[in-house]
Amino acid sequence: MHKTCNRKNIKTSTDMNTKIIERINALRNKMSVEGIKATIVPQTDPHQSEYIADHWQVRRWLSGFTGSAGALVVTTDQAFVWADSRYWLQAESQLAGTGIGVMEEGKPGVPTIAEYLCSTLKEGDTVGINGLLFSIDATDALESELNKAGINLCADFDPAAGVWADRPSLPDTEIFIHDEKYAGESAQSKLAKILADANRQGATSALISDLAEIAWALNIRSRDVNFNPVVTSYLLVDPEKSVLFVDQSKLTDDVLRHLDAANVTAKPYSEALKHLEAPPSTAKVLASRNQTSGTIRRILADKLIIGSSPIALLKGCKNETQVEGTRNAMVRDGVALVKAFMEIERKMAEGEKLTEIGVADLLEHFRSQQPLYFDLSFDTIAGFGPHGAIVHYSASPATDATLSPDNLLLVDSGASYLDGTTDITRTITLGNPTDEQRHDFTLVMKGHIALATAVFPVGTRGAQLDVLARIALWKEGLSYLHGTGHGVGHFLNVHEGPQSIRLNENPTALSVGMITSNEPGLYRAGKHGIRCENLVLTVPAFSTEFGDFLRFETITLFPFDLRLFDTELMSDEEIEWVNEYHHEVYRRLSPSLNAAEQEWLKAKTAELTK
């Protein structure tokens, strides 16, 4: 049976490769007709989103690569996907046999897309892009680099038009209101703050393209993008009358009344660009340089004020209602995880077959039983053994590994509740861990604890703290290539700016009310992967004559696997942190658990000693 399944998978893979080759050839024919020598297909939409609706999955459809980031570049005789370190292994596997190569973005010696095009094309050649899918900054940077080599940029080339015949329609799911008892502030209040910031930046109005920012500003949600409760729309915030450009079929009477109360009218999504072509003569429209497309910049011309988002910090710094809601959501999420991991252990102990997809299904099942549950916050990553080393691994029927006691299981998962969003990664042993596994896990946890216990002055940026999570690994010549922390939305996208904790510089300081992940890791290709993730809330610490200081409050509630700690590598303070955290996990979760569940959690949060 195992061999038969393999043959079927090979045949399916071969069929898909043939389709990918046909699609790339069709694109090249279109390029030839329109005089385009190369095209770039990014993984985004006209709103510069990280996660996108099926209608905008052009790169995925053309290449077969399913990662949430990475651009496809097609020339007349070559094709590559630029993938960051999270997706190197995945891209290599998914693109094998398609004629599309992998550029391991960020690795020394690997050219950027612009460098590649400038070295491959000739002077006078033209690169074609869909200008809606490139931000103002990205468009400017690309055009500048190409022009230096005498290469032209055409921003009116749509790679999907005429090539993707059965392209899915734009999403048409209904909008619903995110109640103020969860949001903590009215849409009217938020719009007033947005306009005040636009005025401060010299504008009379503000165009909001980012879908999460629109959902936050208007206290509305939908299901337009898998795992992201956003609404496909544009929002023009104006003192006279704000306009939401959205598919009219998505609007209910309740939503229309809600919008009207906030002095917002609704117009068809398809009319957004046309509306922007004829603004009032005195209009000055603020737009964010990295959230607004180059096409919109061209349309607005001298009416455009390019500035910073008036929403990013407002949305990133959660108010007291949102913070309390998220804390409550963490309790329910922790309860669901206790039930799910107990079931994983039961199945393993009784010899029942359990696969990676089965683990994901268990997590979704128990989370869905919790009050205020809405959806998963992203597609669960359950990677057993070598699959755990693929940073953003996604199990499929062809790769779905059966769990056994001889390796580690990495589970990265989360949920959207009406009062908060969760994101947690735990790495557990399914049997007797090796010395190497315990050593690796403990080094990762040393970094996790160092970041969790950090105290830092107001104005500190994530890049200034990132080393805390890595230094224990670096001292042994080990590292990981992804960021250490990303912002998390409130009943919104699990990946949210403006803050981050990573090696790359980000000018946004960590501020009170921000919720950020703490997720160092270590990945040994072909062996195992380890990641340990909690969400942390930035809170005041204390004040001295040297200024005000901040710290992190860990808000995720679920134990780490005690069997994986090598306490000989740990300081007394690190052991104490683990014990205090586990004590808090038991204190917060146990009232919501039955006797058997309490007993299980008691064992999982037992004292860690040398």
Image (spheres, rainbow, N blue to C red):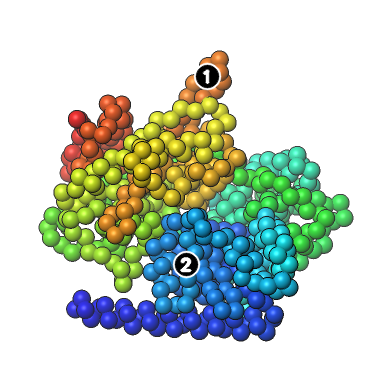
Which residue is located at x 68 percent, y 40 percent?
Answer: 193
Q: Residue furthest top?
A: 545
Q: Amino acid at mark 1?
A: Ser
Q: Is residue 338 left or right of residue 132?
A: left
- Mark yes or no: residue 286 visible: yes
Q: Is residue 181 left or right of residue 468?
A: right
Residue closest to the eye, 236 or 249: 236
Which residue is located at x 73 percent, y 67 percent?
Answer: 150
Q: Amino acid at mark 2?
A: Val
Q: Which residue is mark 2?
A: 102
Alpha-carbon distance for marks 1 and 2?
A: 50 Å
Q: Residue furthest left?
A: 350
Which residue is located at x 22 percent, y 49 percent?
Answer: 429
Residue closest to the eye, 88 or 491: 88
408 up-or-down from 146: above or below: above
For mark 1, does the 10 Å Cα neighbourhood hold few (<14), some (14 to 19), or many (20 or more) residues? few
For mark 2, does the 10 Å Cα neighbourhood hold few (<14), some (14 to 19), or many (20 or more) residues? many
Question: Where's residue 407, x and y in %?
Answer: 21, 54
Residue closest to the eye, 328 or 59: 59
Question: Where's residue 177, x and y in %?
Answer: 55, 53
447 up-or-down from 145: above or below: above
Question: Where's residue 494, x and y in %?
Answer: 47, 51
449 up-or-down from 413: above or below: above
Which circle marks residue 419 in the picture?
none
Which residue is located at x 46 percent, y 27 percent?
Answer: 455
Q: Which image quarter holds the C terminus?
A: top left
Q: Is residue 446 left or right of residue 69?
A: left
Q: Secondary structure at mark 2?
A: strand
Q: Is residue 398 left or right of residue 461?
A: left
Q: Which residue is mark 1?
A: 543
